[in-house]
Image (spheres, rainbow, N blue to C red):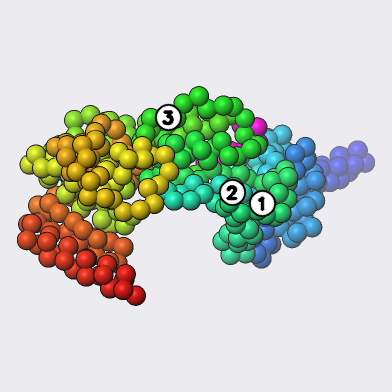
Amino acid sequence: MWRHVVSNALTLAIVILFLVGGVIVWGTSQYKEGGPLAEAICLQVPSGASMGSVSADLAEQGAVSNARIFRLGADYSEKASQLKAGSFLIEAGASMEQIVDVVTRGGRNTCGTEVVFRVGVTRKQVQVRELDPATNRYVEQARFEPQVEPVDPVYTAALDASDTLIRFAVAEGVTSWTIVEALNNIDFLSGEIAAVPSEGSLAPDSYEISKGQDRNEILADMAARQERILAQAWAERADDVEVETPQEALILASIIEKETAVAEERGQVASVFTNRLKRGMRLQTDPTVIYGITKGEGILGRGLRRSELRAETPWNTYVIPALPPTPIANPGRASIEAALNPESTDLLFFVADGTGGHAFARTLDEHNANVAKWRKIEAERNAN
């Protein structure tokens, strides 16, 4: 009899073991395999949320097939305590394992509403946009020029929301004075900026900022990023570059940045200036003359006068036979790399071609013909 009981108990234990093993295998496959989500969603994880509340939200939105398995998987992988607050893009078909990774990895928001303070060469704008998870594209909600146009209520509401991402986006070719002015005009930042950073020392890029953040901290981040970019480009420079120091490279890069907005032209523009420096020719570039007048504080807003082209200033490259003493703007990575790895050409001149780009020339005769074409285009535009 006892044998019979023991035998039945053993059989039952084996059955239970197989059942448990089967459940574990099934649960693991459910956790790791692609999920049921048909279209991407933006998952909002509020501050103080738990993995339990997140799993319930995911189940309600059809992103996970079983909230309990999601929680158990997060516990088993020891990630349940690493949940981050924010807005996260959950891709269609994402597995529970992938979703857990997204909401615990940290870093910036990957979806939701963004307020972007855009600083351009000629104007500043505030943009409110929201990522559409279905298309993975941002949809603009509002746009206005601060200090020029009324504040849009959409902006105020977005700024009040706890999960809104705020960005400070600086375009290539913006001066340090303009960046400082823009930061001073963002009223939810803190800290007084004692002095304008050196021209060229700030990396144009998009920076995540927050309410109450010190303005000097943002500038320090921009300066550190530019240092890294310049150091890397200097280490990878061509053997025959004509600049002798990283600072000279930054100066040349800033001129390249101001001379062309066409990415494909940077290498050619860099080659023109490099060839001129090798031959001891003046660079003869208008943006340096303009900087000598404005010192980077605002835009000139008019054409250069003949007297200004002849006036001797440290930045007038029609007069001085070399690089100016400082950069004339903050160049981006591409212009810095072009300055230190210019294309190999025998080009010496360029002028606008009427399409937004430039016509390049090897000889003065070729250049004069290109200038004549440009003057004709200008005359026709003025007549119209």
Q: Residue at x 73, y 50 (%)?
A: 157
Find the magenta span and give its range: 207-213
Residue type of the residue flagged with mark 3: Pro
Residue nearest the observer in this picture, 354 or 112: 354
Whether residue 279 is visible here, answered yes or no, is yes
Q: Circle 3 is placed at which residue position?
A: 197
User: In x, y percent, where is residue 174?
Assistant: 41, 44
Q: Quadrant of residue 203?
A: top left
User: Does the magenta portion include 208?
Assistant: yes
Which residue in the rendered view is the most extreme toward the top? 194
Residue name at image x 88 percent, y 43 percent: 4
Left or right, 183 with respect to 130, comes to left
User: Residue at left 31%, top 44%?
Assistant: 290
Amino acid, disc 2: Pro
State which quarter of the image contains the N terminus: top right
Q: Nearer the viewer, mark 3 or mark 2?
A: 2
Looking at marks 1 and 2 on the same chain, the residue that comes earlier in the sequence is marked by 2
Q: Residues within 10 Å of mark 1 (few under 14, many from 20)?
A: some
Which residue extends farthest front? 307
Find out whether the residues at labels 1 and 2 contact each other: C-beta distance under 8 Å.
yes
Q: Are marks 3 and 2 in contact (CB under 8 Å)?
A: no
Give the Cα separation between the discs numbered 3 and 1.
29 Å
Is there a contact, CB below 8 Å, between mark 3 and mark 1?
no
Looking at the image, residue 190 lies above or below residue 115 = above
Mark in the foreground, 3 or 1: 1
**Circle 2: element type:** loop
Q: Which residue is mark 2?
A: 146
Answer with mark 3 or mark 1, whichever residue precedes in sequence: 1
Q: What is the residue that sits farthest to the right in this orientation? A: 1
- Quadrant where the image shows the C terminus: bottom left
Is residue 316 magenta-colored?
no
Which numbered disc flags the more N-terminal residue, 3 or 2? 2
